[in-house]
Image (cartoon, coloured by chain):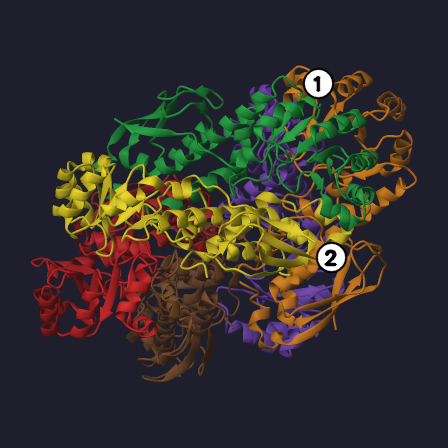
Chain colours: A orange, B purple, C brown, D red, E yellow, F green
Amino acid sequence: MLGPINMDHLRSSIRAWLLEDMPHGDITSQNITESRHSVEVQLIAKESGVICGLDVMTMVFQEVDDLIELNYSVKDGDLIHTSQVIGHITGPLASILMGERLALNLLQRMSGIATMSKLYSDEVEDYDTRIVDTRKTTPGLRSLEKYAVRIGGSHNHRFSLSDAVMIKDNHIKAAGGIPTAVKQIRSQIPHTTKIEVEVEDLDGLRTAIEAGADIIMLDNMTNELMTEAVAITDGKAILEASGNMVLERLKGVAQTGVDVISVGALTHSVKALDISLKFK
Amino acid sequence: MLGPINMDHLRSSIRAWLLEDMPHGDITSQNITESRHSVEVQLIAKESGVICGLDVMTMVFQEVDDLIELNYSVKDGDLIHTSQVIGHITGPLASILMGERLALNLLQRMSGIATMSKLYSDEVEDYDTRIVDTRKTTPGLRSLEKYAVRIGGSHNHRFSLSDAVMIKDNHIKAAGGIPTAVKQIRSQIPHTTKIEVEVEDLDGLRTAIEAGADIIMLDNMTNELMTEAVAITDGKAILEASGNMVLERLKGVAQTGVDVISVGALTHSVKALDISLKFK
Amino acid sequence: MLGPINMDHLRSSIRAWLLEDMPHGDITSQNITESRHSVEVQLIAKESGVICGLDVMTMVFQEVDDLIELNYSVKDGDLIHTSQVIGHITGPLASILMGERLALNLLQRMSGIATMSKLYSDEVEDYDTRIVDTRKTTPGLRSLEKYAVRIGGSHNHRFSLSDAVMIKDNHIKAAGGIPTAVKQIRSQIPHTTKIEVEVEDLDGLRTAIEAGADIIMLDNMTNELMTEAVAITDGKAILEASGNMVLERLKGVAQTGVDVISVGALTHSVKALDISLKFK
Amino acid sequence: MLGPINMDHLRSSIRAWLLEDMPHGDITSQNITESRHSVEVQLIAKESGVICGLDVMTMVFQEVDDLIELNYSVKDGDLIHTSQVIGHITGPLASILMGERLALNLLQRMSGIATMSKLYSDEVEDYDTRIVDTRKTTPGLRSLEKYAVRIGGSHNHRFSLSDAVMIKDNHIKAAGGIPTAVKQIRSQIPHTTKIEVEVEDLDGLRTAIEAGADIIMLDNMTNELMTEAVAITDGKAILEASGNMVLERLKGVAQTGVDVISVGALTHSVKALDISLKFK
Amino acid sequence: MLGPINMDHLRSSIRAWLLEDMPHGDITSQNITESRHSVEVQLIAKESGVICGLDVMTMVFQEVDDLIELNYSVKDGDLIHTSQVIGHITGPLASILMGERLALNLLQRMSGIATMSKLYSDEVEDYDTRIVDTRKTTPGLRSLEKYAVRIGGSHNHRFSLSDAVMIKDNHIKAAGGIPTAVKQIRSQIPHTTKIEVEVEDLDGLRTAIEAGADIIMLDNMTNELMTEAVAITDGKAILEASGNMVLERLKGVAQTGVDVISVGALTHSVKALDISLKFK
Amino acid sequence: MLGPINMDHLRSSIRAWLLEDMPHGDITSQNITESRHSVEVQLIAKESGVICGLDVMTMVFQEVDDLIELNYSVKDGDLIHTSQVIGHITGPLASILMGERLALNLLQRMSGIATMSKLYSDEVEDYDTRIVDTRKTTPGLRSLEKYAVRIGGSHNHRFSLSDAVMIKDNHIKAAGGIPTAVKQIRSQIPHTTKIEVEVEDLDGLRTAIEAGADIIMLDNMTNELMTEAVAITDGKAILEASGNMVLERLKGVAQTGVDVISVGALTHSVKALDISLKFK
């Protein structure tokens, strides 16, 4: 359900996060005999947004105790609204309390990202332009955060330094120019790997096209310059607009005809979506 | 320098976070021969605040390449201001670029927490009241986030479900009352472990004191009620105010005489402090 | 059943211990075809004591082969007597032989500790005094050994250097006195953490009370001195008697009115309880 | 120095054992600023015996802090006597306190085993008979305990179920006799692996010799029977005496001419050798 | 079924190998919705040989998805022939595609080794001589490769440097002769461990016999010399022929009467057996 | 030196491979006292080829013992010839013997691949065509084997199922055609990821071009068909020839103008290059 991510790694991360919150169990709940009894709990939205992370919440609780059962009335990507009961959880009280903090923490954060992702992608829905994330994710949570971006309707940029080439100003300076940098790198990488080059003006753009860049990042350009860039490129490379891409600018940027707009804010400044457990 | 935290775990987390960002190295930098040359980089504050995480930044870069050298002109806890050069980094260009993203991500987040922690603790500096954090931390980052809280002048609450007892309403309901809950738990835990009980009114407070609670959490009480609670308790337990403790309320709450005010916002809504690398 | 301990860690320890005893399987049993047949085995007490570790034994055997079934006629904490059949195990012969050594080793050791723990706690059952263990446990087995102490009726001291403060003579010397040491530490630790101070005479006791110590360890004091200490303290701190607390002294020490007596011998000099498997 | 053991595993065990004793550091020592100062400590024998585990003690302390320096005036296997200063340790006070408990625990246990091992092996020094240990070792400590046995002058039996064949009564019953059992197993194992067969009488012995057993265990036989067994065997197999081999019987058993006597007590009932640190 | 091997290690190796081939899942199959549908696949031999690794193939696929079911019409060790359908696999298309590459890679390699092993062992089936493998195995695959050797009818030599002694020319030179080397080593190792000595001529052989070697390796000797060696040894040690033991020589070497012939080629130069999946 | 690969993973693999070969050390070498003395050893080529894996060999030996020093007179990628001394190793005899087997195993295999890689790439050196490897690598060794391919002058295909899309016949059938498959996948993957489509005829080719495939694999086509395919494609996609690409066909295939030829044999059928250690 979570798509092509590393499930092994996710499972062991969840185990590690649970241990962070209870290295020797829950000395409150587990020392009250009656906490072994089963209870029923509601999962309730405290504000409106895009829900994301339900499968992860299930994994958290079932890692704590496979007696816990979860039933959701929504699925990842659905819109939820304030006060909506979006699921029911039943199981031993102690077990639910042991998983509650981590489960909510992840669900709230992922839903917050998906909600923001939808806000940004909706803004450009009339254009053939993708909103994409960046590498400014929380250490250890990148897979989940990038999944939440997709659930919200935006897209992902490269996952890491290993899966696509991004030639920046420092690289160009070191190599002695865009052509040399591209040539050196292309000779070492598979033909299945794309090369992106960052440029700051139209001269750079022309050199990058010539050098055969697959993607060209237009760094901090005005809409006027980007419109010109789109004309010059004429489909020979994917164009990505980057730098201070706040919500208000998106439509204007999309109108220039660029293919991709990258937005660090999607994962960098997460406002959690308020969701809580209500014990009956 | 980082105090009594699990250094083994931190080191292996850093290794894991680096791998998240480059499972097979940096296919851009490492495929440009000249990137092996040494460069010098400045660490610059882009806004004012409390710096925190310098030792962690050092660990990140030296994990990438022990040829990287870092020199800071400030130390954790110092105030920094916009445009201040707070350190110099020298080493191979490729190595610095490989560690840059993770190092900044951690430094910015930790400094953001320390800055907020100072803001909150300064607010009550004239009172004998501690501001403390909660368990609403980022999965996998709790040690570092709690360290940043301390660096900023606030204090920590319990680290996890395992190191102090916190009896909440669900526990009380399950056990059939505060006295039974306290008694059951005390018989199982070491004499070195404290018991905190959450109460919602003064009756609960009196019962908790009677039961021998070491700490009593006053949940969502008015300042008037809390003033009364302080009088009733008369030093027989530590009193902790909790629930919607926004910055504006802190002074008033401190004036009631409670010992501790817990603030989820210290780690829950982190605004990163803007700090960046400048390559010469 | 095992209470609030780290089950993840226990499971992986069991796996590691099994591998220690058969890194490449059992080259005897697994090379005899007929060893795959099911057999029935009795678990028999060869001497009297308190049984402890049955759940751990189950985990060991089921880690080897989930076809193994175990049924016990007693539960952890029960008294067992010589020749009593306390359980039945059925499963493939090879699998049972592969788990036998480790399972018995743990069961015998844990039962030995529980038996001794009961002996010590029974001695002071007429007093309001706890017998507690120390950190002199077997490397890697602390959780299980401390669990066995609880099962036998005694209690646990702090689990580790991380969960409660214990200020000893070297700390006091380094810090320049009890008051400074307590103050330095209290400013760094959560309000949920207790501070214990070790004192050697009544002057030290008075200083420690003044400094606000939660627990005070009376190191190697005579019963007379301890009686005096109880009077001086008057409930303002928990008093712990320590140093050469042999069985014969316990009643006398309890009569002084101290709250806690710590006994290294509970885990330090374990005499295994003889229990064995009998193949029909 | 520790001979052919798994150093990787030992190092990671030491790390795990240290974490067991301080999952989040030492909240006492590390919160006293002056504990960073260097101190000098003596390692003193409190009773006489065979010292063993010095290299392991060094590994423990240097894992805590590589600023710690250890100098010993004895080496593993040497006799030490009450009050003898056997080493000096210098380093930061906090670091030494953090390693002290684990280091002493291991050193005392290993020295206890080595001392007992010497006692047993000395008893048969006039005979061509080896004293050997069994698999009744502490889970997780087998390598160190078997090393201590060797240091004391006794020898090791097989390390685990994987490195030598031991055909016991249950195996023989399952296979339908010694010859079938030996034949089945020999066809599967390398020619470099020995087969030991347990027998209870002289008929069994003769069958085992015939079947080509490399080693034959004489289970619970009288000295008279064993003398006869030696004569019958006439060097065609190694003979091992087993079952209730208490110290007092050893000489008599050695006189029968058996090659090996196995003694569970070498590791099963460890009496730690009293050794302590003395801070100046 | 796989015999006495380390199943824990195998399972975690399989998990690691799967991650090598899909660190973030299969971005093709998992992004096609219809790939979740179940399909049926045939396992087909493309050439004749000895099948080996079916249980491992099952483990691979069930690690990917426990909805995958496998049914084989043959078992490890059976002869298979070109075009024979040897099994059926059903399960979600995406899951089967995700395990296919690793599963076939292991099955083909193991079957290749088993096929070669049978070829070599058949050659000497009329003699009382074992064909054995060496330590020239693929790093990380030794257990599986040695299992495949056994399945094909040949046998294993020692598993590693830890489980049997092999004294080579460099050891002899260092120790100052065979007798000293054997004596030094025998005093340290268990009586359950065999000693093999490598000799290059009949003088060496006689010295090794005298020193009590359990096994003697005749290194690069002619058949004539080996015949003489067999006569001299007269059953007092196991004789192993080694050095350039190509298939054509085996019968002649076996005729000399040596007990064991070691053949690096069994695992060193693996020709995979062609087996493939056919999707209906 | 090894380029952008996962060094953390390589180091821990080397440690695991060493443990496979000596779980409890080397009971021969480590039990001969004189084996601690230093010796000097030559690394000698026994046949001609391309050397590859020298840095890995260094890592192996230094993992065993950092007293071992290695000096090479060649570097990865250099041609070596029979009898050439290509390096010197000095260090304790026991340490060198403990690393010898693994080091040579890796060096011989990697050099074998590099040698074959050069043979294949030399064949097409007059054409603008790349020879690339496949996913038919040894489980656990993919990084090293793909590095060896690059050292020999050929190139890499995608590293795994996660870093580039490859739509095969089963995917096309499941999705209901190439256009749907491409569209579904493109909507989920980053704009930085390439899509390759496998086609069997020119109709498929035209559909794939239309659908916007970045790379098109021509599966088992004749040279004539491929020549036509090149003309049709006209630079709109990268063309990859695949299926039975034996050495003899390469020139002819390159002449058709395809961009890439993929060759499973590069890693699938490795013939080790004979290199050995010579102790003086």
Q: Would residue A235 be seen by someone viewing this image from the given angle?
A: yes
Say whether marks 2 and 1 touch (CB < 8 Å): no
Please state which of residues F206 and A145 is positioned toward the viewer in this rendering.
Answer: F206
> The residue tagged with tag 1: helix, strand or loop?
helix
- At a point 36% along the width and 20% down the height, the residue shown is F84
Residue type at tag 1: Ile
The answer, for residue C188, to whether it is visible in the render is: no
In the image, what residue occupies the spot 20% across and 42% down?
Answer: E226
Residue F253, above or below C95: above
CA gap between label 2 and label 1 equals: 47 Å
Query: In which chain is the residue bearing label 1?
Result: A
- What amino acid is at disc 2? His
Q: Is residue E161 left or right of residue E145?
A: left
The spot of residue D26 in percent (x, y) is 46, 51
| Apparent side of residue E100 relative to residue C197 in the rendered image (left or right) | right
Q: Out of C269 and A137, give the one closest to the viewer.
A: A137
Quarter of the C terminus of chain F within the rendering: top left
Q: Which residue is under mark 1?
A: A178
Q: Is residue E259 above or below residue F278?
A: below
> Closest to the observer: E114 or D103?
E114
Left or right of residue A82, residue D95 in this image: left
Q: Which residue is mark 2?
A: E37
Tell me if mark 1 has few (under 14), some (14-19) or many (20+) residues whose alpha carbon lies within 10 angstroms of its own: many
Identify the residue at image location x=32%, y=34%.
Answer: F96
Classify mark 2: helix, strand or loop. Answer: loop
Q: Would residue D265 appear left or right of F57 to someone viewing this image? A: left
- Chain letter of the residue beneath label 2 in the structure image: E
